[in-house]
Protein backbone atom coordinates (compact mmCIF):
# COMPACT_ATOMS: atom_id res chain seq x y z
CA UNK A 1 0.00 0.00 0.00
CA UNK A 2 1.31 3.41 -0.97
CA UNK A 3 1.88 5.75 1.94
CA UNK A 4 0.37 8.76 0.19
CA UNK A 5 -2.36 8.67 -2.42
CA UNK A 6 -3.40 11.69 -4.41
CA UNK A 7 -6.25 12.01 -6.89
CA UNK A 8 -4.47 11.14 -10.08
CA UNK A 9 -5.69 13.93 -12.31
CA UNK A 10 -5.09 15.72 -14.49
CA UNK A 11 -7.61 18.21 -13.19
CA UNK A 12 -8.92 20.84 -15.56
CA UNK A 13 -10.92 23.74 -14.15
CA UNK A 14 -12.21 26.97 -15.71
CA UNK A 15 -10.75 30.26 -14.60
CA UNK A 16 -12.50 31.54 -11.50
CA UNK A 17 -13.64 28.09 -10.33
CA UNK A 18 -12.56 26.15 -7.26
CA UNK A 19 -9.93 23.47 -7.74
CA UNK A 20 -10.15 20.69 -5.16
CA UNK A 21 -7.21 18.39 -4.53
CA UNK A 22 -7.29 15.41 -2.21
CA UNK A 23 -4.67 13.32 -0.51
CA UNK A 24 -4.93 10.33 1.82
CA UNK A 25 -2.13 8.99 3.98
CA UNK A 26 -1.47 5.73 5.74
CA UNK A 27 0.33 6.69 8.94
CA UNK A 28 -2.33 7.49 11.52
CA UNK A 29 0.22 9.08 13.84
CA UNK A 30 1.38 11.66 11.31
CA UNK A 31 1.56 15.18 12.66
CA UNK A 32 2.64 17.50 9.87
CA UNK A 33 1.14 17.91 6.41
CA UNK A 34 2.33 19.95 3.47
CA UNK A 35 1.27 21.06 0.03
CA UNK A 36 3.85 21.87 -2.62
CA UNK A 37 3.34 23.49 -5.99
CA UNK A 38 5.64 22.59 -8.86
CA UNK A 39 5.59 24.47 -12.12
CA UNK A 40 6.82 22.64 -15.18
CA UNK A 41 10.61 22.61 -15.24
CA UNK A 42 10.89 24.08 -11.75
CA UNK A 43 11.45 22.76 -8.26
CA UNK A 44 8.65 22.11 -5.74
CA UNK A 45 7.69 25.13 -3.66
CA UNK A 46 6.02 24.90 -0.25
CA UNK A 47 2.67 26.72 -0.32
CA UNK A 48 0.83 25.42 2.75
CA UNK A 49 1.43 23.41 5.88
CA UNK A 50 -1.12 22.29 8.44
CA UNK A 51 -0.78 20.50 11.73
CA UNK A 52 -4.25 20.63 13.33
CA UNK A 53 -7.62 19.29 12.28
CA UNK A 54 -9.76 21.78 10.44
CA UNK A 55 -9.14 24.46 7.88
CA UNK A 56 -6.20 26.75 7.33
CA UNK A 57 -6.55 29.60 4.89
CA UNK A 58 -3.85 31.58 3.12
CA UNK A 59 -5.11 33.90 0.44
CA UNK A 60 -6.90 31.86 -2.19
CA UNK A 61 -5.61 28.58 -0.75
CA UNK A 62 -7.32 26.54 1.96
CA UNK A 63 -5.85 23.38 3.41
CA UNK A 64 -8.21 21.02 5.21
CA UNK A 65 -7.05 18.26 7.54
CA UNK A 66 -9.06 15.39 8.92
CA UNK A 67 -6.83 13.12 10.96
CA UNK A 68 -9.60 10.68 11.85
CA UNK A 69 -10.22 10.00 8.17
CA UNK A 70 -6.55 10.39 7.28
CA UNK A 71 -6.99 12.87 4.50
CA UNK A 72 -5.80 16.33 3.69
CA UNK A 73 -7.14 18.49 0.91
CA UNK A 74 -6.25 21.71 -0.82
CA UNK A 75 -8.81 24.11 -2.24
CA UNK A 76 -7.79 26.79 -4.69
CA UNK A 77 -10.47 29.44 -4.92
CA UNK A 78 -10.87 31.78 -7.87
CA UNK A 79 -8.43 29.66 -9.87
CA UNK A 80 -6.12 31.57 -12.18
CA UNK A 81 -4.07 30.37 -15.17
CA UNK A 82 -0.99 30.99 -13.01
CA UNK A 83 -2.23 28.19 -10.71
CA UNK A 84 -1.62 25.66 -13.49
CA UNK A 85 0.99 23.37 -11.99
CA UNK A 86 1.48 20.01 -10.32
CA UNK A 87 0.54 19.92 -6.65
CA UNK A 88 2.29 17.49 -4.32
CA UNK A 89 1.05 16.58 -0.89
CA UNK A 90 3.45 15.36 1.74
CA UNK A 91 3.33 14.29 5.35
CA UNK A 92 5.78 13.57 8.11
CA UNK A 93 5.25 10.07 9.53
CA UNK A 94 5.33 9.55 13.24
CA UNK A 95 8.87 9.04 14.55
CA UNK A 96 10.52 10.16 11.35
CA UNK A 97 11.75 13.47 10.02
CA UNK A 98 11.65 12.52 6.35
CA UNK A 99 8.58 13.57 4.42
CA UNK A 100 6.60 11.13 2.31
CA UNK A 101 5.41 12.63 -0.96
CA UNK A 102 2.48 11.82 -3.16
CA UNK A 103 2.91 11.46 -6.90
CA UNK A 104 1.22 14.79 -7.54
CA UNK A 105 -1.90 16.06 -9.26
CA UNK A 106 -1.56 18.23 -12.33
CA UNK A 107 -3.97 21.14 -12.46
CA UNK A 108 -4.75 23.10 -15.60
CA UNK A 109 -6.75 26.29 -15.31
CA UNK A 110 -8.31 27.15 -18.64
CA UNK A 111 -9.08 30.73 -19.48
CA UNK B 1 22.47 35.09 -0.76
CA UNK B 2 20.47 33.06 1.73
CA UNK B 3 18.93 29.88 0.49
CA UNK B 4 19.77 26.58 -1.09
CA UNK B 5 21.70 26.42 -4.32
CA UNK B 6 22.50 23.56 -6.65
CA UNK B 7 25.13 23.38 -9.32
CA UNK B 8 25.37 22.84 -12.16
CA UNK B 9 21.86 23.54 -13.47
CA UNK B 10 22.45 21.36 -16.52
CA UNK B 11 24.98 18.63 -17.12
CA UNK B 12 25.60 16.26 -19.99
CA UNK B 13 28.03 13.44 -19.33
CA UNK B 14 29.07 10.19 -20.89
CA UNK B 15 28.33 6.73 -19.62
CA UNK B 16 30.94 5.57 -17.14
CA UNK B 17 32.13 9.00 -16.06
CA UNK B 18 32.03 10.21 -12.50
CA UNK B 19 29.80 13.22 -11.89
CA UNK B 20 29.33 15.30 -8.76
CA UNK B 21 26.27 17.43 -8.15
CA UNK B 22 26.69 20.18 -5.60
CA UNK B 23 24.25 21.42 -2.99
CA UNK B 24 24.83 24.31 -0.60
CA UNK B 25 22.49 25.83 1.99
CA UNK B 26 23.01 28.91 4.10
CA UNK B 27 20.54 28.26 6.95
CA UNK B 28 22.61 25.71 8.86
CA UNK B 29 19.73 23.26 8.63
CA UNK B 30 20.66 19.88 10.04
CA UNK B 31 18.65 17.73 7.66
CA UNK B 32 19.35 17.56 3.96
CA UNK B 33 18.09 15.30 1.20
CA UNK B 34 18.72 14.27 -2.38
CA UNK B 35 15.84 13.29 -4.66
CA UNK B 36 15.53 12.35 -8.25
CA UNK B 37 12.38 13.06 -10.23
CA UNK B 38 11.40 11.12 -13.31
CA UNK B 39 8.16 11.06 -15.27
CA UNK B 40 5.90 8.43 -13.79
CA UNK B 41 7.89 8.05 -10.59
CA UNK B 42 7.48 11.28 -8.72
CA UNK B 43 10.13 12.22 -6.19
CA UNK B 44 12.37 9.37 -5.09
CA UNK B 45 14.74 9.72 -2.17
CA UNK B 46 18.34 8.83 -2.94
CA UNK B 47 20.23 9.77 0.24
CA UNK B 48 19.64 11.90 3.26
CA UNK B 49 21.66 13.36 6.10
CA UNK B 50 20.76 14.30 9.65
CA UNK B 51 23.97 16.26 10.32
CA UNK B 52 27.57 16.56 9.25
CA UNK B 53 29.12 13.11 8.88
CA UNK B 54 25.75 11.39 9.29
CA UNK B 55 24.24 10.06 6.06
CA UNK B 56 21.86 7.28 5.19
CA UNK B 57 20.41 5.54 2.16
CA UNK B 58 17.01 6.35 0.81
CA UNK B 59 14.81 4.48 -1.61
CA UNK B 60 17.15 4.40 -4.64
CA UNK B 61 20.79 4.71 -3.48
CA UNK B 62 22.51 2.31 -5.88
CA UNK B 63 25.16 3.98 -8.01
CA UNK B 64 25.30 7.10 -5.85
CA UNK B 65 27.59 8.28 -3.07
CA UNK B 66 27.20 11.24 -0.72
CA UNK B 67 29.35 13.00 1.81
CA UNK B 68 28.71 15.72 4.30
CA UNK B 69 31.86 17.07 5.87
CA UNK B 70 30.24 20.46 6.53
CA UNK B 71 26.68 21.22 7.55
CA UNK B 72 26.09 23.53 4.61
CA UNK B 73 27.27 21.21 1.82
CA UNK B 74 25.82 17.92 0.67
CA UNK B 75 27.34 16.78 -2.64
CA UNK B 76 25.98 13.81 -4.57
CA UNK B 77 28.36 11.75 -6.70
CA UNK B 78 27.49 9.33 -9.44
CA UNK B 79 30.44 7.00 -9.38
CA UNK B 80 30.03 5.64 -12.92
CA UNK B 81 27.13 7.28 -14.68
CA UNK B 82 24.58 5.15 -16.50
CA UNK B 83 21.79 6.19 -18.86
CA UNK B 84 19.23 5.18 -16.25
CA UNK B 85 20.57 7.98 -14.07
CA UNK B 86 19.39 10.57 -16.57
CA UNK B 87 17.00 12.56 -14.44
CA UNK B 88 16.31 15.81 -12.62
CA UNK B 89 18.00 15.90 -9.24
CA UNK B 90 16.75 18.01 -6.37
CA UNK B 91 18.50 18.80 -3.15
CA UNK B 92 16.42 19.94 -0.17
CA UNK B 93 16.95 21.06 3.38
CA UNK B 94 14.43 20.88 6.21
CA UNK B 95 13.41 23.84 8.30
CA UNK B 96 11.95 24.12 11.78
CA UNK B 97 8.39 23.48 10.59
CA UNK B 98 9.63 20.21 9.02
CA UNK B 99 8.88 21.51 5.55
CA UNK B 100 11.52 21.15 2.87
CA UNK B 101 13.00 23.91 0.78
CA UNK B 102 14.21 22.60 -2.53
CA UNK B 103 17.06 23.82 -4.66
CA UNK B 104 16.46 24.72 -8.28
CA UNK B 105 17.52 21.29 -9.47
CA UNK B 106 20.13 19.80 -11.77
CA UNK B 107 19.03 18.33 -15.06
CA UNK B 108 21.47 15.51 -15.81
CA UNK B 109 21.69 13.73 -19.13
CA UNK B 110 23.88 10.66 -19.49
CA UNK B 111 24.70 9.80 -23.10
Image (cartoon, coloured by chain):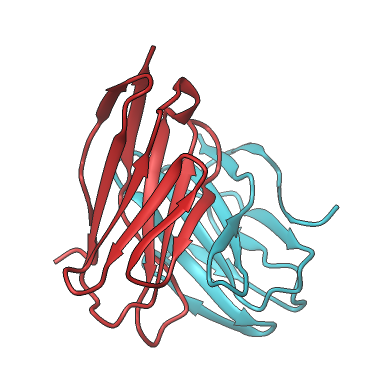
| Residue nearest the observer in this picture, A73 or A88 | A73
Residue A55 rendering spot, x and y as whole percentages: 36, 59
Residue A25 rendering spot, x and y as whole percentages: 23, 66
Q: In the rendered view, tell whether residue A28 sits above or below residue A95.
A: above
* Residue projecting furthest to the left: A1
Asked if residue A109 lies left or right of residue B55, the reply is left
Q: In the rendered view, tell whether residue A74 sits above or below residue A99.
A: above
| Residue at x-position 67% and y-position 63% | B75
Asked if residue A64 lies left or right of residue A45, the reply is left
| Residue nearest the observer in this picture, B68 or B1 | B1
| Residue nearest the observer in this picture, A106 or B86 | A106
| Residue at x-position 35% and y-position 84% | A94
Q: Colour of chain A?
A: red
Q: Colour of chain B?
A: cyan
Asked if residue A15 lies left or right of residue B94, the reply is left
Residue A26 rendering spot, x and y as whole percentages: 20, 71
Whether residue B85 can be seen here: no
Counting the numbered discs, the total is 0
Whether residue B19 can be seen here: yes
Residue A14 rendering spot, x and y as whole percentages: 31, 19
| Residue at x-position 21% and y-position 68% | A70
Q: In the rendered view, tell whether residue A111 sits above or below residue A13.
A: above
Asked if residue A37 lies left or right of residue A71, the reply is right
Amino acid sequence: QKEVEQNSGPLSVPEGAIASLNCTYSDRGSQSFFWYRQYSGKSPELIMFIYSNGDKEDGRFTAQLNKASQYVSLLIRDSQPSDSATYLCAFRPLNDYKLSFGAGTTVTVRA
Amino acid sequence: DAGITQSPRYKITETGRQVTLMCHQTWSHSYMFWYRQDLGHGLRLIYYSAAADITDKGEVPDGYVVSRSKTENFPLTLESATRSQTSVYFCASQGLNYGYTFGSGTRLTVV
